[in-house]
RNA sequence: GCAUCCAUAGCUCAGCUGGAUAGAGCGACGGACUUCGAAUCCGUAGGUCGCAGGUUCGAAUCCUGCUGGAUGUACCA
């Protein structure tokens, strides 16, 4: 589609130049000034060229220029033009375009949509970053969905991607669940109690908060445990290792069930020490300074901010300390051209300071760091609050979604057709969830209504899956009846109805959509595109009988188009982590 | 207080570097299954694009101010 647009820009530029010289005028940088748009309604044409920008050159009204241009263009081989007020609209030659489509998106074109936009670029993407004291919640699911999808989109754009996680496994909040386990655990384990590890540990975190209400020394005891941990106390460390393992194993199971993966895990417990060393070096180099209160700080007055603590007065680390260490370790491991932190908008200040600190420390790559800031997930009743117990647990949500899907499958009596009902249910549930989370622009806050928003009708993930499943079923039938169509030929000129034409244009615009998503770091571009395409297919197969078209060649051509649509849906699903299923 | 972000249909969201009559879904109402699975399709109703200025031939989009909301402004993460 890009090629087609560029061809037209050249033609329009030549036409304008000709029209201008006929009036004794000469235009400069015509091609760059030409704007290509899509007319608001398809019957107006396929491409639109507004003439407003040339009004001053010609010293005439845009509608007149459009007329002059149409005249100077005359008859064209690649389509036709028509004036519409101040616009010159182009109608593409449908047969030619359809022909190129079928060539480009042949069967098995798994690479369709990929580009070399970011060729030779090393990009690291950090996302998820859970604490090891409780299981994942809905907020993490948005983070995971964005991180995974962005990584896939950038990879499809040619980048060398490294997905990384950072496990927040140290600090007083971790000690709280450990302490509660010591007090109330009675030696139980996730295995012995039959509870997933992260949930098991999470229960003790909740237990601590209950206990701390009864016992005023609880907080103090947790602090003491942190000191013991930092000083390397063997017993505390053993407990820490055990409980961390439980949580991480549990969280990894959630990743597995949501299709999220990482190339490398970093652990805060490994990086906070190197971060501390880095702060000390920064102190020597006078990048940081020692405050009167004994803490080591960074002066941010040069960027209009206050000061920020890099290391506590007692020498222990803060969040900033370990993030410095982590960033440096990462660049050593994988010399990235870009590092994208997928982290909530509430941490914008933190990253501003982090990036500035690294710059001041002399790391030239500090300017390659980017905070992909995303908004909160709220509930219809308001914010999720752990104190009020309104936090939506990730595993629980996935389970209840799957249950809802399963009921639907049974109600529609599709159980026999889909094969394994549970597997299919969870795949559909995942599609509902991921589509819902990714269809919203990342930077915006969003409302998650578990009851209404995750319906399986309309603008949803399951709708997309439904359309692709329908395609599969049509293609199966076509194969079954292949004898009937043996001698048929694909003839792109037969695909000339409006429904087919809209579909063809959509399929051809897929690579451009992926590029846009990569440039904007915005998976919702792909999500929206997939919905538009699925919807256009829905219209097409209602309007245009495929197997029963009454003409072998037409059927064969429509099958080729249908296959192209399936290919685009498949490739697009992968970018937004929606499982492809052939039956539902 | 200051800083950043957000405000589009009853609800949830799209709207590309400014361009033609602002679009979907849900919900409401009305149609379409003896014909490729109706988790579908088609139609109707529903909008002062928060308010007020400005730039421009032209603004939902860019600028300024205001109102409302979110977040941040920790030796928490």
Image: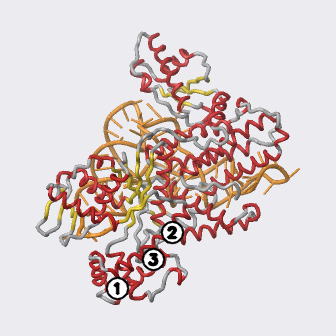
Q: In this view, does A117 lie to the left or right of A562?
A: left
Q: Is residue A447 left or right of residue A101?
A: left
Q: Which residue is drawn at 69% across and 54% down?
A: A582
Q: Residue at x 17, y 51 (%)?
A: A302
Question: Which of the 4 quarters of the picture holds residue A397?
Answer: bottom right
Find the distance from the CA under tag 3 to the CA under tag 1. 17 Å
Residue A346: x, y in percent? 35, 61
Chain under label 1? A
Residue A220: x, y in percent? 27, 83
Using the image, determine if residue A231 lies above or below residue A554: below
Question: Which of the 4 quarters of the picture holds residue A498?
Answer: top right
Q: Is residue A224 left or right of residue A416?
A: left
Whether discs 3 and 2 lie on one chain: the answer is yes
Whether discs 1 and 2 lie on one chain: the answer is yes
Find the distance from the CA under tag 3 to the CA under tag 2. 14 Å
Q: Name the residue under label 1.
A: A212
Chain under label 3? A
Q: Mark 2 points at which residue?
A: A394
- Tell me which numbered mark, 1 or 2, is placed earlier along the sequence: 1
- Tell me the element at label 2: helix
Using the image, determine if residue A239 lies above or below residue A471: below
Q: Residue at x 56, y 62 (%)?
A: A453
Residue B9: x, y in percent? 51, 55
Chain under label 2? A
**Of A385 and A474, the residue lying toward us:** A474
Q: How crowded is mark 2: few (under 14 residues within 10 Å), some or many (20 or more)?
A: some
- Tell me the element at label 3: loop
Which numbered tag is attached to residue A389?
3
């Amino acid at each position: 589609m890009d090629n087609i647009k560029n061809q037209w820009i050249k033609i329009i530029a030549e036409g304008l130049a000709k029209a201008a010289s006929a009036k004794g005028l000469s235009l400069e940088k015509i091609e760059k000034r030409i704007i290509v748009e899509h007319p608001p309604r398809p019957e107006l044409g396929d491409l639109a060229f507004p003439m407003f920008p040339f009004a001053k050159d010609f010293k005439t009204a845009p509608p007149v220029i459009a007329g002059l241009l149409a005249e100077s263009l005359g008859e064209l081989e690649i389509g036709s033009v028509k004036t519409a007020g101040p616009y010159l609209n182009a109608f593409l030659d449908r047969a030619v375009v359809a022909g190129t489509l079928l060539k480009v998106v042949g069967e098995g074109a798994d690479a369709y949509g990929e580009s070399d936009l970011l060729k030779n670029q090393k990009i690291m993407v950090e996302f998820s970053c859970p604490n090891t004291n409780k299981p994942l919640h809905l907020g993490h699911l948005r983070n995971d969905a964005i991180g995974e999808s962005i990584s896939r989109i950038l990879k499809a754009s040619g980048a060398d991607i490294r997905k990384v996680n950072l496990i927040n496994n140290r600090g007083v909040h971790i000690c709280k669940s450990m302490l509660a386990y010591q007090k109330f655990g009675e030696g139980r384990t996730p295995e012995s109690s039959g509870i997933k590890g992260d949930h098991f540990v999470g229960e003790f975190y909740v237990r601590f908060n209950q206990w701390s209400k009864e016992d005023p020394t609880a907080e103090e005891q947790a602090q003491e445990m942190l000191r013991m941990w930092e000083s390397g106390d063997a017993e505390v460390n053993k407990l820490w290792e055990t409980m961390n393992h439980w949580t991480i194993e549990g969280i990894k199971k959630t990743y597995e069930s949501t299709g999220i993966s990482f190339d490398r895990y970093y652990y805060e417990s490994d990086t906070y020490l190197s971060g501390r060393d880095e702060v000390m070096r920064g102190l020597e180099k006078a990048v940081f300074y020692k405050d009167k209160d004994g803490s080591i700080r960074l002066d941010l007055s040069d960027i209009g901010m206050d000061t920020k603590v890099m290391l506590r007065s007692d020498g222990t680390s803060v969040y900033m300390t370990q993030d410095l260490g982590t960033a440096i370790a990462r660049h050593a491991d994988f010399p990235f051209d870009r590092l994208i932190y997928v982290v909530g908008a509430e941490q914008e200040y933190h990253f501003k300071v982090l990036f500035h600190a690294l710059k001041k420390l002399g790391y030239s790559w500090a300017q390659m760091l980017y905070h992909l800031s995303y908004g909160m997930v709220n509930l219809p009743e308001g914010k999720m609050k752990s104190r009020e117990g309104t936090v939506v647990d990730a595993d629980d949500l996935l389970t209840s979604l799957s249950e809802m899907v399963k009921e639907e499958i049974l109600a529609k009596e599709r159980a026999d057709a889909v094969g394994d009902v549970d597997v299919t249910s969870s795949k559909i549930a995942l599609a509902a969830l991921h589509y819902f989370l990714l269809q919203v622009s990342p930077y915006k806050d969003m409302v998650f209504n578990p009851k209404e928003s995750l319906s399986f009708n309309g603008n949803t993930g399951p709708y997309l899956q439904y359309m692709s499943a329908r395609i599969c079923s049509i293609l199966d039938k076509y194969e079954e009846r292949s004898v009937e169509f043996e001698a048929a030929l694909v003839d792109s000129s037969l695909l000339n109805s409006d429904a087919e034409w809209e579909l063809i244009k959509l399929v051809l615009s897929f690579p451009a959509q992926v590029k846009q998503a990569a440039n904007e770091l915005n998976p919702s571009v792909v999500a929206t595109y997939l919905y538009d395409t699925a919807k256009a297919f829905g219209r097409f197969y209602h309007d245009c009988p495929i197997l029963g078209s009454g003409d072998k060649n037409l059927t064969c051509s429509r099958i080729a188009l249908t296959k192209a649509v399936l290919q685009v849906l498949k490739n697009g699903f992968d970018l937004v982590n929606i499982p492809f299923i052939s039956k539902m």
